[in-house]
Image (cartoon, helix red, strand yellow):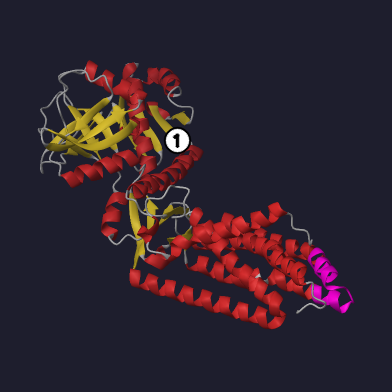
Amino acid sequence: MLQFPTWKKALIGIICALGIIYAAPNFFPQNTFEGLPDFAPGKTLNLGLDLQGGVHLLLKVDTDAVVAERLESTVDSVRRTLRSERIGYTGLGSSNNAVTFALRDGSQATQAAAQLSQIDTTLSVSQGEGGRFSVTLDEATLEQARNSAVEQSVEIIRRRIDELGTTEPIIQRQGIDRIVVQAPGVDDPEALKKIIGQTAKMTFHLLDERVSPGQVPATAPPGTQILPSNEEEGIRYLVERRVRVSGERLVDAQPSFQDNQPVVSFRFDSLGARQFGDTTTDHAGRYLAIVLDGEVISAPVIREPIIGGSGVISGAFTVQAVNELSLLLRAGALPAPISYLEERTVGPGLGQDSVDAGKIASIVGLIAVMVFMTLTYGRFGAMADIALIFNIGLIIAILSGLQATLTLPGIAGIVLTIGMAVDANVLIFERIREEVAGGRSPMSAVDAGYKRALTTIVDANVTTLIAAVLLFAFGSGPIKGFAVTLSVGIVTSMFTAIMVTRFFVVSWLRSKRPDALPI
């Protein structure tokens, strides 16, 4: 344990130096390290919601809307199937997670059942008296749709917030249908709610040919729906329910200008481009309605086939509206509406108070530990104190490199690490004292002390590390922050205790060769 090859000395020196260098940006103004290459020091710790202020939202995903949409799609599939086979029906609609209708001619029941069973394997077709049919959705399928809607909402909200440039937001699922959003540094909760809450579901439909745009009957005929205009109040459109191209096929949407008017340029993927091309080719001269969140934002005439899979959305847009719409379309549509159950805004003043309190706790803890070690173990304790400073530098450097978000529990983890960092040295130094009391020479006592304490040190730190990993795996946001700082602190404290402090002790022993140890 007293042998230090040249390469090991160099490695210890390089690691400690890098720790101090990469931790340094946290203690200088942000623009100090601007313009340096990516590998150069410049990254700093991100402060969490409780330290720099921001917005906390608790959202609820309307999973019932997903089920209703799935039923509506099934109604449309049943209608098209029956019409294609010339099977007459009445009362087609949905209720209680089932699609129901009655046949006009009971002799077609066998044919209807055979055709309906081919629509989807997850559908269950049952026949009642009087030619009545019930098409039900499998409960497992509905549950999967609900779960998928929440998971998709989490990812889409994450992409939308990332587009805003918010640093290290926390977006995670809570319970069955709830989502927690924490956006540090955001000072306008209403703007954030507007970006998050808009469903931004875009679809392309054909207008019904039987009426002129803006002139619709009181009730929509089967297979159509009446939608309001997004541009002009009081104007409504009769739109086919069939979706010709879904907004899910959009791969890009960017703000641009056309004839000095702000517009949104969009581009489909290969399948969407083919669907869009087929629609514009087969229905030239008809009106194509662009529907966003249940409102017609534009209904241009298809003058010629559009084969390239790209186009523009024009309307009475402002530049800000175009930018917001482009952002929403790029991030994707929420699969279901969301509502806000809870909203909290943390002011930056409260966050700064937490930072100051954390600094004071860290400094007091560091000074107390250093004084204790120096008074208890003298010169060896002072060496452990120097290693402790390198340990803190390494923790900050690693967390900065990982772009981790520091929260109050994270600061608690660092304070705890400061106390735990010298545990290994305490075990080693006490073991050295026992060896000295047993009559060993200084060199022999130090060698035996490190060898015999090593197993205990590893066992103690590994068990704590396992607990930290479990906290990270199963904990929520604040608990994860505590687990990350604790895990990093355990690794760095083992390095500084076993390598750095031992290097100081061995170097002093070899240079001074004392007759007795000052411990």
Q: Which residue is more in the foreground, 140 or 268?
A: 268
Residue at 72 percent across and 73 percent down: it is 426
To which quarter of the image does residue 350 belong? bottom left
**Relative depth, front residue between 324 and 362:** 362
Any part of residue 347 in sight: no
Q: Where residue 155 appears, x then y in whole percent? A: 42, 45
What residue appears at the point 38 percent right and 42 percent down from the top-left corner?
A: 66
Instruction: Examine the image and state in which quarter residue 282 appears.
Output: top left
Q: Give the vertical position of 474 relative to 220 (above or below).
A: below
Which three-letter amino acid code belongs to the residue tagged 1? Answer: Leu
Magenta segment: does it hold 500? no
x and y percent of residue 237 in the render?
Answer: 15, 34
Give left or right: position of 54 versus 451.
left
Residue drawn at x 70%, y 77% is: 379
**Could you tell me residue 464's position as x and y percent?**
67, 63
Q: Which residues are magenta?
A: 432-451
**Residue 238: x percent and y percent?**
17, 32
Mark 1 is surrounded, within 10 Å at the Cα level, by few (under 14), some (14 to 19) or many (20 or more) other residues, namely: many
The answer to whether any part of residue 177 appears in the image is yes
Secondary structure at badge 1 equals strand
Disc 1 marks which residue?
137
Asked if the stretch drawn in magenta spans residue 435, the answer is yes
267 in relation to 469, above or below: above
